[in-house]
Image (spheres, grey):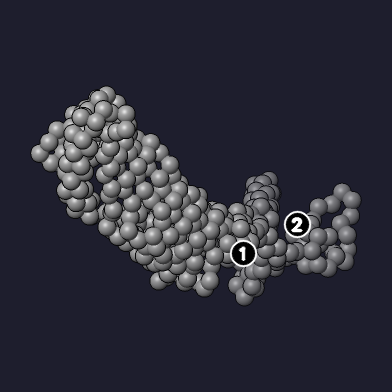
Amino acid sequence: MSQLRFGTSVLTLTVGLVIGTSMNQMSIAEEVVPESITHLAVTDEVIATSVTTEKSETPPQPGTFTYSAGDLLAKKPLDLNIFCKNYPLNSQCTNQPVTTPATKPEEVKPKPTEEKSAVPAKTHGWAITPEISTLGIGAAVTKSITPNINVKVGVNGLGASRDARLSEVDYNAKVNLFNVSTLAEYYPWKNGGFHLTGGLVFQNNSLDGSAKNGQTVTIGTRSYNIGDGPGSVTLKAKGSFVNSVAPYLGIGWGNAVKPDKHWGFSANLGVMFAGSPKLDLIASSSQDINTIPEPFRSGIEARIQTLQNDLEEERKKQENALNWLNVYPVLSVGVSYQF
């Protein structure tokens, strides 16, 4: 019986020790688990509240461990800016303005400048313009008087031989052109090229021709042989204009003395009031009258006189046909250079 009581007491003591041990382990577990969780999952709140810049009063002894985040990070001050970037929801960052490190403004590189505008050409308002026109080949000198007015003096001339046909007669003709022009140009718009031109042309233009030999021509109602043989005649024509000083009016494009510009192009169209053309027709015997025997001489002289009368009628007719040239068309183009 006593043994039973002893066994019961031992069993009771053993159960009590087991239960007590279990209770102690549970309490230890309850205390350890939160602490271990706190250290394993380092949350924003734990680090923010644990980290201080003060050093631990009692440094950890060798062979021991510390679970204080402050002991681990005390030697390195906390940078809240960096911390709050990584843990923006932490209570320490709620009212903490996050400042970004000051960065140097990007250096504004100047944009590559476009090509510098060409330096304005230095000009003096004088220009020379080689040109080709219906007055001949020549050149003009232009001077700027005001921003809207230029004056110009030009010389044109031409000498050329060509075949011509006049009054059903073929001629070997030579054209002689010589003109000196004094003109003024008015530009309604300062920076424009359009201009009006007026002035005077001193002209000496003419045409000389000789009828070709070997042809039979009809002048008036009679036929004549042109040549050097007996009974043949020679025929010459000469034309000119009445007005040696002819007014000129025209329009054009281009300004030879445009400011800050050396080279330019010009074109002009106008009319010269040269007057009605004057035409002379001269006929003569191809032989010297004095060398012809007397019986034949009088007949040849009478024939030549008749030819002269017929030529006068023909001259009037041709002058009327050429009357349109009293307003002589002038077209010119040129390239100018300003000094």
In x, y percent, where is residue 107? 68, 60
Q: Quadrant of residue 67?
A: bottom right
Q: Is residue 125 left or right of residue 275?
A: right
- Label 1 element class: loop
Q: Pick whichever, 223 or 8, lies toward us.
A: 223
User: Where residue 105 sits in the image (x, y, percent)?
Assistant: 67, 63
CA distance for labels 2 and 1: 95 Å
- In the displayed structure, does residue 247 sit left or right of residue 22? left
Residue at 32% from the left image edge and 33% from the top image edge: 290
State which quadrant residue 189 falls in.
bottom left
Toward the front, the furthest residue is 294
Which residue matches tag 2? Answer: 67
Q: Can residue 111 be seen?
A: no
Is residue 159 or residue 140 the one in the foreground? 159
Pair 2/1: label in front: 1
Q: In this view, does 18 lie above or below 232?
A: below
Q: Position of residue 103 (x, y in %)?
A: 69, 63
Residue 247 screen position, x and y as percent: 36, 65
Q: How crowded is mark 1: few (under 14 residues within 10 Å), some or many (20 or more)?
A: some
Residue at the location (22% across, 55% down)? 323
Instruction: Kindly identify the amino acid type of the residue bearing the numbered disc 2.
Output: Tyr
Q: Residue beneath label 1, please?
A: 124
SS under mark 2? loop
The residue under label 1 is which amino acid type? Answer: His
